[in-house]
């Protein structure tokens, strides 16, 4: 039975697709969580035909339920990674992906799925990312692609690509956040017992810490918790370093080594996430939202929303706000670290 008023997601499948990525896509968009106020999704497994199961590694098989013609109905098309990253995709699949991009449908590829989009020529002259261990391979086989060496996920011309394994989860949750708001993404993340927010610019590969660094990590975790409880205050890197008992330079070095991002970038991401929640859950005036999220002024908050989210706080509220009484009834209006 087709669903009419839901967000339609197409999982494009052909022999060679990676079972892990298929599972991630299915877990994010193929599980009904509407009883927890999550959006309604219609995930379809799309292939050349629906009569032949698609084998996957480990003795698994995917059973398509729609042909490539269904891509014209999709709001989002997701391409899983590959077990063999040089697996040639069937010509009808490549043609269908080209037509979908020409129509303006967002495309997303997890891990080695970037190789499929590259085969279609969709990444030529565009920025793309893949697993850190596949960067050289992607460059060698697709020299017209601008391969970004170190990120979790990126977007170029409505085409999203992600690094390996867990970064695929990050991209899927980001796409939910982008289309349905931060609270929807957080609901799905809680169900999956995974982190609700990792920015795409965060480094995908972090060196394994030494024993002293493990002790530093405990200190840094306490600093991050302190920052989240005091977002409404004008925190600086020097403030956080002092709380950690380190010099600002040493603190910044240890923080980046442990998290893959700088203290300032991390703090800005947390402020934006806090503002998103306030805009979704409350009807507070914009200056108060800016104050509680630690931006200091509505102007500063608006500038950061424009640069990070390509929208304004008011437009974000209009798209994703939940009436306060609804939020309270669903349990999302309870305690949170944002200062009242």
Image (tube, grey):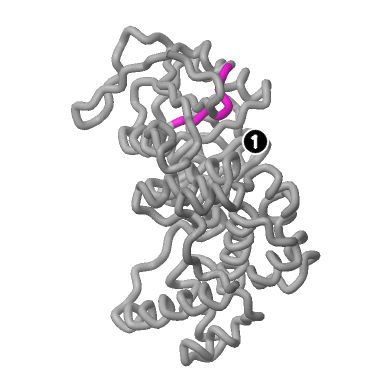
- Judge from the rendering whether residue 227 lies leftward or rightward of residue 189; answer left or right: right
Please give the residue where the numbered disc 1 appears in the rendered image: 158
Above or below residue 116? Residue 148 is below
Taking the magenta stretch, the answer to whether it contains residue 135 is no
For the C terminus, the image quarter is bottom right
Q: Residue at x 56, y 78 (%)?
A: 230
Measured as percent of width and height from the top left, residue 278 is found at 61, 59
Q: Is residue 114 visible?
A: no
SS type, badge 1? loop
Please name whichever residue, 178 or 77, is drawn nearer the observer in this view of the structure.
Answer: 178
- Determine which quarter of the picture holds residue 283: bottom right
Q: Which residues are magenta?
A: 73-79
Q: Residues within 10 Å of mark 1 (few under 14, many from 20)?
A: few
Measured as percent of width and height from the top left, residue 162 is found at 49, 44
- Judge from the rendering whether residue 249 lies leftward or rightward of residue 67; answer left or right: right
Direction left: furthest residue: 59
Q: Residue at x 31, y 10 (%)?
A: 52
- Determine which quarter of the picture holds residue 156: top right
Please name whichever residue, 198 or 96, is drawn nearer the observer in this view of the structure.
Answer: 198
Above or below residue 158? Residue 45 is above
Please name whichever residue, 178 or 132, is drawn nearer the observer in this view of the structure.
Answer: 178
Q: Is residue 4 visible?
A: yes
Direction right: furthest residue: 299
Q: Residue at x 73, y 49 (%)?
A: 311
User: Looking at the image, how many numbered discs can be counted on the residues?
Assistant: 1
Measured as percent of width and height from the top left, residue 147 is found at 57, 45
Q: Residue at x 41, y 46 (%)?
A: 164
For the N terminus, the image quarter is top left
Above or below residue 185? Residue 50 is above
Taking the magenta stretch, the answer to whether it contains residue 77 is yes
Measured as percent of width and height from the top left, residue 199 is found at 54, 56
């Amino acid at each position: 039975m087709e669903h009419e008023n839901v967000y339609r997601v197409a999982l494009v499948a052909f022999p060679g697709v990676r079972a892990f990525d298929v599972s991630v896509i299915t877990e994010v968009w193929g599980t009904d969580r509407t009883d927890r106020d999550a959006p309604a999704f219609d995930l379809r497994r799309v292939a050349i035909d629906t009569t032949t199961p698609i084998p996957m590694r480990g003795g698994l098989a995917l059973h398509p339920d729609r042909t490539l013609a269904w891509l014209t109905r999709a709001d989002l098309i997701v391409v899983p990674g590959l077990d063999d990253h040089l697996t040639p995709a069937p010509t009808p699949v490549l043609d269908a992906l080209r037509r979908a991009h020409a129509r303006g449908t967002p495309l997303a590829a997890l891990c080695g799925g970037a190789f499929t989009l590259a085969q279609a020529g969709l990444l030529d002259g565009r920025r793309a990312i893949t697993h850190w261990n596949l960067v050289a391979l992607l460059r060698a086989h697709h020299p017209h692609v601008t391969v970004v060496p170190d990120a979790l996920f990126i977007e170029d011309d409505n085409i999203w690509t992600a690094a390996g394994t867990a970064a695929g989860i990050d991209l899927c949750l980001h796409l939910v956040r982008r289309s349905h708001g931060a609270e929807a993404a957080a609901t799905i993340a809680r169900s999956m017992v995974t982190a609700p927010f990792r920015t795409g610019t965060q480094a995908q590969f972090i060196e394994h810490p030494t024993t002293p660094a493990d002790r530093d990590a405990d200190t840094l975790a306490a600093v991050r918790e302190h920052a989240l409880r005091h977002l409404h205050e004008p925190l600086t890197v020097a403030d956080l370093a002092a709380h950690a008992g380190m010099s600002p330079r040493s603190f910044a070095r240890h923080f980046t080594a442990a998290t893959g991002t700088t203290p300032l970038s991390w703090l800005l991401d947390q402020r934006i996430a806090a503002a998103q929640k306030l805009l979704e859950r409350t009807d507070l005036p914009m200056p108060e939202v800016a104050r509680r999220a630690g931006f200091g002024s509505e102007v500063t908050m608006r500038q950061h929303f424009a640069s990070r989210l390509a929208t304004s706080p008011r437009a974000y509220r209009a798209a994703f706000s939940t009436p306060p009484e609804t939020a309270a009834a669903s349990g999302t209006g309870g305690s949170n670290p944002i200062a009242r």
